[in-house]
Image (cartoon, rainbow, N blue to C red):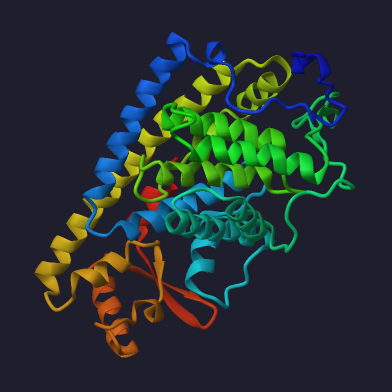
Amino acid sequence: MSNPMESFDRNTPYNSLPLLPPDDEKVETKEVYRALNNANKALAELKGIAKKLPNQSMLVNTIALREAKASTEIENIFTTDDELYKALTISEYGTSSNAKEVLRYRQALWKGYHDIVKHRALTIETMIDIYQEIKQVNDGIRPPQTETVILKRGSGKLTGEVVYTPPRGTEIIRQKLANLIEYINDDVKYPYDPLLKIVIFHYQFEAIHPFRDGNGRAGRILCILLMNQKELLNVPILYLSAYIIRAKDEYYEHLKNVTSLRKWGPWIIYMLRAVEETSKYTISKIEGIDKLFSKTWGLINEKHPSIRKEFIEKLFEQPYISPKKLLDSNIKSLNTAKKYLKELEKSGILVPEKIGKEIVYLNIDLYNILSES
């Protein structure tokens, strides 16, 4: 059997990219299993704490948006928290192209989540759906005439040099993806720890690079969704990109070293640390949100007993709220919604702000929790 490393050349399509799984001796080390144990413990704690929230949609909407913002920042697409929250609250709000990219990421995350829940497995169609939602395009697998290469990022004289050329040819890409999907879905044929499989999956997806663009964002979405598929989490709440932003150079360096040197260990440990640290970070956010919600609900229940708990939960789904967003089976009148919001303004819980022609209300304490790095 030929050594696949003999045929690796960063300027040539890597059609000999080895299939999964990687050799056990490359993966099964004491250091990897120590990191795996720590990551699984943190993830289990996150799953348990998230269950305690009275309404998980409070958390899902806020954390998913944080992840969307961070993941797009990795691709050098920047926007502000304030702009994002306003764009979600007022449909007429003039949203920048960068903010739209972030919101599309969140839409893609939700689309993929519903697909995973429906099929209880990952499919190539779900991958394509996520890509199409991120990029707002109708194409699918990268065609052979698209000569995609990965260039060195950052600054310095080597910036812009080719560091990797992914496999080329629709059939070759589909074969690699078929192996990748079988590896992640079939836990009988590939009976490895689920989190370990997800980390290995992420490298392989990025190495295959199946789409013209958006592969990094699609890959990070898939990581979170696979945690739901494997029942490591109930809802997509892991703020994984926060860690990668802080150690972005390492992220790309480890990816490169798996490709060029088959150094799986450092990559796996890096990603497991990302899961562990971001699980702890997300737990701190949940605890902050839950504590604020309890205090807010206690205050409102004492001063405004006519306001239902479901109303308050909506104030915690995102920092800004408009009267229209509060209408439901319990509150059918816009005037009633405005009246409640005015009462909460008087209590110092909400702060009014005019956006265009509409008055919206800011839950400033929630905003501060979410904005803290």
Which quadrant is home to the C terminus?
top left
Residue 229 falls left or right of residue 338: right
| Residue at 55%, 79% in the rendered image | 356
Q: Is residue 75 visible?
A: no
Q: Is residue 127 visible?
A: yes
Instruction: Say if 364 sits above or below 256 in the image.
Output: below
Relative image position of residue 192 (x, y in whole percent): 44, 26
Q: In the depicted view, which residue is nearer to us: 362 or 109?
A: 109
Relative image position of residue 22 (x, y in whole percent): 59, 21
| Residue at 30%, 35% in the rendered image | 44
Of all residues shown, which one is farthest toward the right?
145
Quarter where residue 362 is shown: bottom left
| Residue at 61%, 23% in the rendered image | 250
Which quadrant is home to the N terminus?
top right
Instruction: Say if 23 sits above or below 373 in the image.
Output: above
Residue 152 falls left or right of residue 303: right
Residue 223 falls left or right of residue 367: right
Instruction: Say if 354 sits above or below 14 in the image.
Output: below
Instruction: Say if 102 sits above or below 206 in the image.
Output: below
Q: In the depicted view, which residue is nearer to us: 194 or 265?
A: 194
Relative image position of residue 58 (x, y in whole percent): 33, 59
| Residue at 43%, 79% in the rendered image | 359
